[in-house]
Amino acid sequence: MGLSTHVLDTMHGCPAAGMGVSLYATTGGKAELLQRLHLNADGRNPSGPLLDNTTLRVGTYRLVFDVKGYFAARNVPLPEPSFLDQVSLDFGVADVSQHYHVPLLVSPWSYSTYRGS
């Protein structure tokens, strides 16, 4: 259980290995950085869940994905400014006994997310 993420690069049809991700707890418009990481070869946190059952709390969170940095590192030609830079996903956790999985499907021009299992 806890909180996890997984990022897939839909332009290349592969996991977004190396993408930078930041996790924040948010309260009343303020964001507290909880951790920064780079995704592993499978597009996931190399340390497992972002937050496990003991650290996940009821409340609101923000995941920030460095989309521009990832595609620039893959030598994808991007306009300046790029269409997508940082993709921020704000979401709420209402029941810490459940697993919250926040996947991101991304290209330099689009993204999609959902609550996974």
Image (cartoon, rainbow, N blue to C red):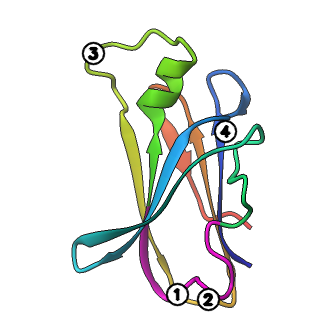
Structural crowding at the residue carrying mark 2, measured as other residues with C-alpha within 10 Å and reported as few (<14), some (14–19) or many (≥20): some
Q: CA distance from mark 3 to mark 2?
A: 41 Å
The residue beneath circle 1 is: 57
**Image position of 104 with respect to 59: above or below:** above
Instruction: Using the rendered view, name the quadrant where residue 40 is placed.
Output: top right
Range of residues picked out in magenta: 50-62
At mark 1, the secondary structure is: loop
The residue beneath circle 3 is: 80
Q: CA distance from mark 1 to mark 4?
A: 26 Å
- As shown in the figure, which amino acid type bears the numbered disc 3? Glu
Asked if labels 2 and 1 touch by Cβ distance under 8 angstroms, the answer is yes
The residue drawn where x is 74% and y is 79% is 1
The residue beneath circle 2 is: 96
Instruction: Using the rendered view, name the quadrant where residue 95 is placed.
Output: bottom right
Nearest the viewer among 112 and 44 is 44
- As shown in the figure, which amino acid type bears the numbered disc 1? Arg
**Image position of 18 with respect to 56: above or below:** above
Magenta residue check for 57? yes
Q: CA distance from mark 3 to mark 4?
A: 23 Å
Pinpoint residue 10: horizontal percent, then vertical percent: 64, 30
User: Which comes before the other along the chain, label 1 or label 3?
Assistant: 1
Structural crowding at the residue carrying mark 4, measured as other residues with C-alpha within 10 Å and reported as few (<14), some (14–19) or many (≥20): many
The residue drawn where x is 47% and y is 45% is 65
User: Which comes before the other along the chain, label 1 or label 4?
Assistant: 4
Q: CA distance from mark 1 to mark 2?
A: 6 Å
Structural crowding at the residue carrying mark 3, measured as other residues with C-alpha within 10 Å and reported as few (<14), some (14–19) or many (≥20): few
- As shown in the figure, which amino acid type bears the numbered disc 4? Leu
Which is in the foreground here, disc 1 or disc 4?
A: 1
- As shown in the figure, which amino acid type bears the numbered disc 2? Val
Q: CA distance from mark 2 to mark 4?
A: 26 Å
Image quadrant containing the C terminus: bottom right
